[in-house]
Image (cartoon, grey):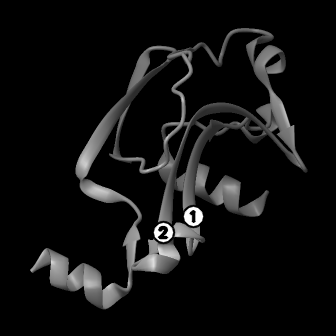
Amino acid sequence: MGRLKNLSRRFRGGPDFNLSQEVTVVLEETQLTLNLPASNVEAAEVPRNINFPYRQHGWFENYVKQNRQHYYVHIVTRCWCYVPMGISALFSELGMLSLSIVIKRISSEKNINEMELDSLGNYTRVQ
């Protein structure tokens, strides 16, 4: 049944939730474990840091990256490609989905607890 469904979609690829990988990072005293679908993009896995002491004075400034108006510290990125079925798959791809998980800074004058998800969500929508 799965193969028939794939043929009717006319593409293959994308996230496969049957094949997943656990990504674990330590945010100060909190361990964050993410269960992400395995990527279908072949890339060399570079060693990455799993310890993020984000409350330590000067840590964010030492590791920050900038993309346009966003300042963040990168945790992990996963990509999934979608390719067409048939011979045209050799020459093109339909698209790519990517997920990047990052740490961003909250203004200290906002006085928001990062573990209160409702107030954190409201803060990020306004920014």
Position in image of residue 28 (x %, y %): 51, 15
Q: Residues within 10 Å of mark 2 (few under 14, many from 20)?
A: some
Front one among 35 and 124: 35
Asked if residue 72 is positioned above or below residue 90 in the image, the reply reads above
Q: To which residue does mark 1 refer?
A: 96
Q: Secondary structure at mark 2?
A: strand
| Amino acid type shown at disc 2 | Tyr
Q: Position of residue 51 (x, y in %)?
A: 53, 13
N-terminal-most mark, 2 or 1: 2
Establish if 7 lies above or below 83: below
- Residue at the limit of the structure toward the bottom, as seen here: 8
Mark 2 in CB contact with mark 1 (< 8 angstroms): yes
Image x and y of residue 41, in percent: 49, 48
Pick the residue in front: 35 or 97: 97
Q: Residue at x 84, y 19 (%)?
A: 61
Q: Quadrant of the C terminus?
A: bottom right
Q: Is residue 24 above or below residue 49?
A: below
Residue under the point 66% across and 32% down: 74
Name the element at disc 1. Answer: strand
Q: Is residue 13 left or right of residue 18?
A: right
Q: CA distance from mark 2 to mark 1?
A: 6 Å
Residue 116 as seen in the image, left or right of residue 121 = left
Residue drawn at x 58%, y 56% is 121
Percent coordinates x, y for residue 7 in the rendering: 27, 85
Check the image and name the residue furthest to the left: 1
**In the rendered image, which residue does mark 2 sit on?**
82
Taking the spot 42% from the left edge, 47% from the top edge, the residue there is 39
For label 1, count other residues whose C-alpha is less than 10 Å away and answer few (under 14), some (14-19) or many (20+): few
Q: Tell me the kind of residue under disc 1.
A: Met
Q: Please give left or right for residue 6 compared with residue 24 in the image.
A: left
